[in-house]
Image (cartoon, rainbow, N blue to C red):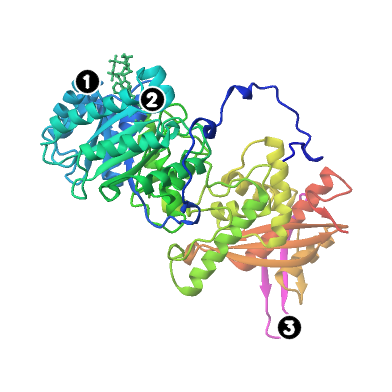
Amino acid sequence: MTTTAPWWDRQLPSGMPSHRYRAVHDRVALPSGPRSWPDARLTAAPLWVPVDLRDGNQALPEPMDPERKRRMFELLVAMGYKEVEVGYPSASQTDFDFVRLLAGSELAPPDVTVSVFTAARRDLVERTVESVRGLRGDVLIHLYVATAPLWRRLVLRRSRQEVLELVLAGARDVLELAGDLPRARFQFSPEVFNLTEPEFALEVCDRVTALWEASTDRPVVLNLPVTVEAATPNVYADQIEWMHRSLARREAVILSVHPHNDRGTGVACAELALLAGAQRVEGCVFGNGERTGNVDLATLALNLHAQGVDPRVDFSDIDAVRRTVEECTGIAVHERHPYVGSLVHSAFSGTHQDAIAKGFAALREEARAAGVDPRELAWEVPYLPVDPADLGRSYDAVVRVNSQSGKGGAAYLLRGATGIELPRAMQVDYARHVQRLADDEGGEVDGERLARLLHEVYAPEGGGVVLHGWHDEHPLDGAASVTVDLAVEGERRTRAFPGAGPVEALVLALAERGVALEVRSLAQQSLGAGSAARAVSFLEYAAAGTAGWALGLDSSTTGANLAAVVSAARRLVLGRAASPATCASGSRLR
Ligand SMILES: CC(=O)SCCNC(=O)CCNC(=O)[C@H](O)C(C)(C)COP(=O)(O)OP(=O)(O)OC[C@H]1O[C@@H](n2cnc3c(N)ncnc32)[C@H](O)[C@@H]1OP(=O)(O)O
Ligand SMILES: CC(C)C(=O)C(=O)O
């Protein structure tokens, strides 16, 4: 195969020392075998195990104090997690005390399994077992030993055989010290599984499950971690599928994964591992953990939700979850974090806003036609993979306006802030003003500012045009007429216009005073209901080679129409003052 780059690829060697690294395939060869994960589908949530209180906690610059541990635990339980790794009780007094707190209180419900972590050292196992005595529910004693060659050579300084013996000695200690605890089960993790020779990982795991006599009544958790992510997720999927097919006592094993996120593909690793036969996932709620973190349980759960699969944990108030996690870890969740970031349901760009607004309108219309709440309908809104309302978010932040936005976004936000639905052609004109404002002021334009802008542009004050009053007369023996009491630039006159309607009369009165305009279209909308109802009029006018829009608001539709004509006249007068050639903010007629 040639390595010559095609003509369209002009990238040059970077000069970075990439030659110092070796691909995982060159370090750990996976035995070939059948592979079914590429065709599998995720149809059910796995057993989730948050390790925020252990793996997440050990990675914090300032580990959680007892109060924060407690809050995190309560949150996890309230969200519906049924197995929680609560600490490394032999490693710190805080962790030991926390497990004792759980044992001596009602904090851990009986249906929640409490998992505790230990290395393979007898004194550490002893202390671990001491910590869990008296717990009401199931207990999982989680033993780990690194099995990968680099760790064997540099960290443990033991041969393969010696590492196997270390594991078995630890497993014997666990069995001896905790085997008689009524509700204890065991877990083993060959740490750095992903960089361990598969046959060795298999041998170690099979020896442990044999020693612990794994059975369907007392299954053993085999947790195969991506301790340091080092390969593309398909490699991990192959490793998991091979283990899944090769393990002895498979029916007595709960196959678990524990991906880290060094390559940024922890979520992909977990998902592909589930396709490949894993049944349980360890991770942290928003991906806290060593280096780039543990796999993000929120993303995994909500990825399922967004595919129509019940995640079996509750993220319906995701911001409350985020606040607690942030307070407990002291680490802020990024604005672009999947599902939970403050910006992830917001669209600033015009085409996205347009599409989202159309999606919402279609949903509203479908719901209206079917006589149901929109939340009962299948979610199909472009650019929004999930309904923000499912996560306890309002729609307020969905569309946000800045200089990248278009007419759809501005109109959408204005509608939310004022209830006013601009006619489509007026949206185009208004968007130009919004764009100018966003460019001039920089940053974001909120709904309140959009409402002010609407009034400033389309219903300006001043211009010397004041409609003091009007009335119509319908004499029984004569022609109807409308009388208009109008001031233009300080000069007030009252005049009757026989045969004219109110709008026409006002237009004629203005023309007499040198403010000529032609009404091209007039549309109305009512705002609110009952005695508080108000009418809004949208007037499109032409005058002296220009066209423009004006807005009128009043308690009656006629009053709103007349107010819109006054607004148009003011715009013309103000525009003349600003520039004799063009009308203020109006567009020239072609
Ligand atoms: C991938 C993971 O997340 S693993 C979990 C990591 N978590 C933590 O380390 C948090 C808490 N840890 C601690 O507080 C400490 O490491 C303790 C209390 C457990 C042990 O402390 P120390 O006895 O001082 O050992 P220290 O941490 O310096 O070094 C680890 C020792 O354990 C050995 N070791 C490492 N893993 C294991 C294991 N799974 N089983 C047995 N021994 C192990 C190392 O080879 C090293 O031994 P050495 O001192 O003979 O070289
Ligand atoms: C030992 C296991 C579970 C672990 O924390 C890891 O490998 O990251």
Residue sitting at x 49%, y 56%: 39
User: Is the Cβ of the residue at disc 2 closer than 8 Å to that at disc 3?
Assistant: no
Residue type, label 1? Gln
Q: Does the magenta stretch include residue 172?
A: no
Residue type, label 3? Gly
Reading the image, the residue beneath label 1 is 93
Direction from residue 575 to residue 424 in the image, left or right: left
Q: Compared to 21, does 385 lie above or below? A: below
Mark 1 and mark 2: Cα distance apart in space: 17 Å
Quick one: which residue is furthest to the bottom in this view?
Answer: 477
Reading the image, the residue beneath label 2 is 59
* Residue 346 drawn at (x, y percent): 55, 46
Local packing at callout 1 (Cα closer than 10 Å; few below 14, some 14-19, many 20+) is few
Mark 2 and mark 3: Cα distance apart in space: 91 Å
Q: What number is the disc on residue 478?
A: 3
Hey, which quadrant is residue 559 in on the image? bottom right
In this rendering, the label closer to the viewer, 1 or 3: 1
- Which quadrant, please, contains the C terminus? bottom right
The magenta region covers: 470-491
Mark 1 and mark 3: Cα distance apart in space: 100 Å
Q: Is residue 475 magenta?
A: yes
Which of the two labelled residues, at mark 2 and mark 3, occupies the earlier sequence position? 2
- Mark 1, secondary structure of its residue: helix
Direction from residue 413 to residue 512 in the image, left or right: right
* Residue 551 drawn at (x, y percent): 67, 57
User: Is the Cβ of the residue at disc 1 closer than 8 Å to that at disc 2?
Assistant: no
Q: Nearer the viewer, residue 514 or 436?
A: 436
